[in-house]
Amino acid sequence: MTDIIRVGIIGAGKIAQARHIPLLQRVPGVEITHAWSRREETARTAARKFGIPNLADRWERIIENRDIDAVVIATPPNLHLPATVAALDAGKHVLCQARMARNLKEARQMLEASRKTGLVTSLYAAGFGLKGDRVMRRLLSQGYVGDLREVRVTSLVPALPEAGAWLVDPEVVGVNTMMLGILAEVVYRWIDPPVSLVATTGEDRLAVPQSLSIGAELRGGATASFHLSFRVPRGPGSSVEIYGARGVLDYKLLVEKPGGLVEDEEMFGMTRGDAGMHPIEMPPKEQRDRTMDSEFIEAIRHGTPVAPDFAEGVRYMEFCEAVAQSIYYGRRISMPPEPKMDSWGRPLQVSARIGGGTFSPPA
């Protein structure tokens, strides 16, 4: 066992200050020794608040420091690939924030780089659906809904008032938007990925969409629909509904309460013999939490598994890639797709030459 694990933070903003830094500092034998953020004042605020002794003027300084054992990458997606590959090349373990990468090509490059090392590589799980994850798995394995027939995934919420401009910058987010990758990650915990999908949006195909409708074919003849929007003034929230031959499970990820949506989770269900839908208890002993920070350290020390790992990240990036391809090319996409998109409306081969006049969207 390593006595002391020294960690560097690449991206010391809200997420790092709310979760990564305080949670890692609670783990015995962990020292956060360096921090960097795109805005120097953000890094200074984190350093003062959490007693981090060193600030880096460039994120590369953290990678180059031989005394640092592991890095947490808590930046927007455009830095995930370069920082991850550089850290692995320097022999450092990596915990990377979601979404995994800008696009599928970058995600696969990260996975390939991780497999060439014996280092721990982990992603930060979406918090949605963890509370009742074990209950959902248990009920589905026991045949609560029977043979799968339909899945409906909905996320109709107002745009976050504090959302940064980078969230709608295709050069930063790639093929990520709204809760697209998050919901794919959550749904994939309970059902297999689609066989194919087709997506539509009423917006400019060159922009990061704020409204999406997706129809998907599942194995065994089942179908799934996804409807996401940040354009509604007061939507019903986010939910995953799973319908089968015997029953239905309805998992509400964002719950409508007096005054608006709250980050609470509720589960309802009905199986054969029930008179109607009823609440399903999620016992505390079965509830999961976002403990990836401590699990990351445990994996470094003892080789225990981490979840989600980079392979799981590639799966939800395949979903995002397929949606972006379907909108760009205007057709159904088979899963898993091959990497073709740099970002929304920008294929890989022309994305770097948009300003030079070589880009023309399909008719």
Image (tube, rainbow, N blue to C red):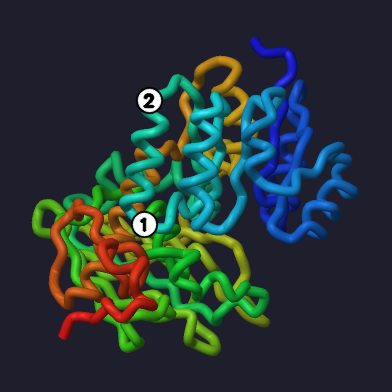
- What residue do we see at 51% from left, 52% from top? 98
Camera sees residue 109: yes
Residue that protrudes farthest toward the front in the picture: 356
Circle 2 residue: 116
- What residue do we see at 50% from left, 75% from top? 168
Label 2 crowding class (10 Å Cα cut-off): few <14, some 14-19, many 20+?
Answer: few
**Disc number for residue 340:** none
- Residue 78 locus on image (x, y percent): 50, 57
The tag earlier along the polypeptide, 1 or 2, is 1
Residue 348, quarter of the rendered image: bottom left
Q: Find numbered disc 2 in the image and state the secondary structure of the residue it sits on.
A: loop
Quarter of the figure with the N terminus: top right
Q: Find numbered disc 1 in the image and state the secondary structure of the residue it sits on.
A: loop
* Of the pair 142 and 197, the residue shown nearer to us: 197
Camera sees residue 245: no
Q: Amino acid at mark 2?
A: Lys
Q: Amino acid at mark 1?
A: Asn
Circle 1 residue: 103
